[in-house]
Amino acid sequence: MSRLVVVSNRVAVPGENRAGGLAVALHAALQENGGLWFGWSGRAVRGESGAVHEQTEGDIRYVTLDINRRDFDAYYNGFANRTLWPLLHFRLDLVDYDRDTREGYARVNALFADKLAPQLRDSDTLWIHDYHLIPLAALLRERGVACRMGFFLHVPMPSSDLLAAMPNHTRLFSSLYAYDLIGMQTQRDVERFQDYVRLFGGGRVLNDGWMEAPGGRRFRAGAYPISIDTETIATQARAAVTKTAVKDLRASLDGRALAIGVDRLDYSKGLPERFRGFERYLETRREQRGKLTYLQIAPVSRGEVSEYQQLRQELEQIAGHVNGAYAEPEWTPLRYVNRNFAHATLTGFYRSARIGLVTPLRDGMNLVAKEYIASQDPDDPGVLVLSLLAGAAYELKDALLVNPHDLDGVADAIAVAATMPRDQRIERWRSMMDHLRRYDIHAWRRSYLEDLRAL
Ligand SMILES: O=P(O)(O)OC[C@H]1O[C@H](O[C@H]2O[C@H](CO)[C@@H](O)[C@H](O)[C@H]2O)[C@H](O)[C@@H](O)[C@@H]1O
Ligand SMILES: O=c1ccn([C@@H]2O[C@H](COP(=O)(O)OP(=O)(O)O)[C@@H](O)[C@H]2O)c(=O)[nH]1
């Protein structure tokens, strides 16, 4: 079988515990057959960009690249996270378009291509990930790389009119035509991309996921919903109840039920709306007041980007307001924690929670929703409250599905989840767990790579 080479901005190098579904999922994918993982080193250095570091663990070779402060600001803080991230999450109001950051993004992608091209063989299967690296295949082809190239977009593909609102959109998005297979999280994402290719991208949509670029090059796009290592997480969750952090959390609840949210501190995750939905629940369900504690874990993410800094302030304010209004001397309704927790510890937290709150305004998939289900006790599972606007909602249909903008709907769902009888909880959980056992991270990787290798 050909060697797998994975490229992503974020690389989970050995010993690192970093929040983010992409890193967690790709690590699980590479663990099975080994291969090479290439990406950013996680450092914004002084001096020139381009120093390369290498390390190996088991069958995985990690090659990472330093980027200097100027490139990092333009590529990651700038074009990737202030232009593309809001655009792809349907937030045109937050898009900051700037030619300098666009050029920084192009420069870093070209550097990735320069450093990666000599490492590649024609027999490799190259799998490039996410919005940071959209033009990479085209740049590698310009450098004579001939291997099979696939792309996976972890975030949503928005409506074509939104994409077309970005200045110079065809220059960026038509570089996707250099891939052989473009994977997206859901069929809706694929359909929206097809609209773009047809209406704005100068291409044609053929049958069975095939498309044709202007000039005749053919490529495919399909839905490959990313998933989790379901069995490992279930095993970790069973074991995690003996961890001190999990025991301490349980003891601190003092017999009350727990609702949990785990999200990077990101405006796409709908945290202000979720806090207000919880407030509405406290306001309208007097009889349930004091019986449920909500723990929100929200590690700081992209903290140098101003929109993220503003969000942090806003959340501190709402959390203070909710607790000021509803706390009792012996009970704090909303616990808000900005720390990052080890994945294995989180599984124990999920298992301790009667309710999992996952209410993003838009999310490519949302692996936390899947991890919450996989971590439950089969005899006494909790209830997942899930946004209709997360990719995960296309699969986890037995969750309590909510529109995250509807605060009353969120409050109702919390109240229903808090009082749901055990047999109903088991029935809902079982059907979602069966799905996740079948469609786990290994099935995701296999189905994508089989399709890519078959082209
Ligand atoms: O690398 P960061 O800037 O720290 O951000 C972390 C990751 O966030 C995004 O994750 C997405 O991928 C998940 C797995 O497919 C998906 O479940 C989630 O809905 C997405 O938001 C981002 O796309 C990654 O590139 C980042 O590494
Ligand atoms: O303190 C934390 C918070 C989150 N995560 C992990 O980060 C990932 C978040 O992925 P998701 O797809 O939900 O969202 P993303 O952050 O990628 O947008 C999940 O695997 C979480 O378990 C973690 O390991 N520690």
Image (tube, helix red, strand yellow):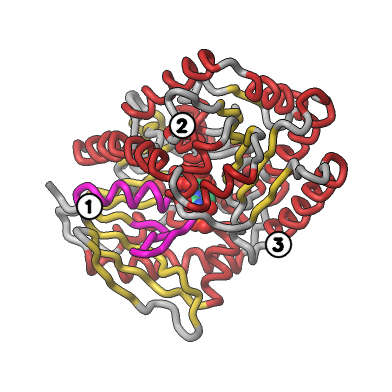
Badges 1 and 2: C-beta atoms under 8 Å apart? no
Question: Which corner quadrant of the image does residue 358 belong to?
Answer: top right
> What's the residue type where badge 2 is placed?
Gln
Q: Give me the residue at 17% from left, 60% from top.
A: 121
Instruction: Give the left or right position of residue 141, taking residue 315 as reference.
Output: left
What residue is disc 1 on? 4
Residue 105 in the image: state x and y as whole percent: 50, 64
What residue is disc 2 on? 376
Instruction: Give the left or right position of residue 283, taking residue 371 as reference.
Output: right
Cα separation between marks 1 and 2: 33 Å
What residue is disc 3 on? 306
Kind of element beneath mark 1 = strand
Query: Against 276, is 141 above or below?
Result: below
Instruction: Give the left or right position of residue 126, taking residue 428 as reference.
Output: left
Pointer 3 or 1: first along the chain? 1
> Which one is nearer the viewer's eye here, 234 or 312?
234
Q: Which residues are magenta?
A: 7-33
Kind of element beneath mark 2 = loop
> What's the residue type where badge 1 is placed?
Leu
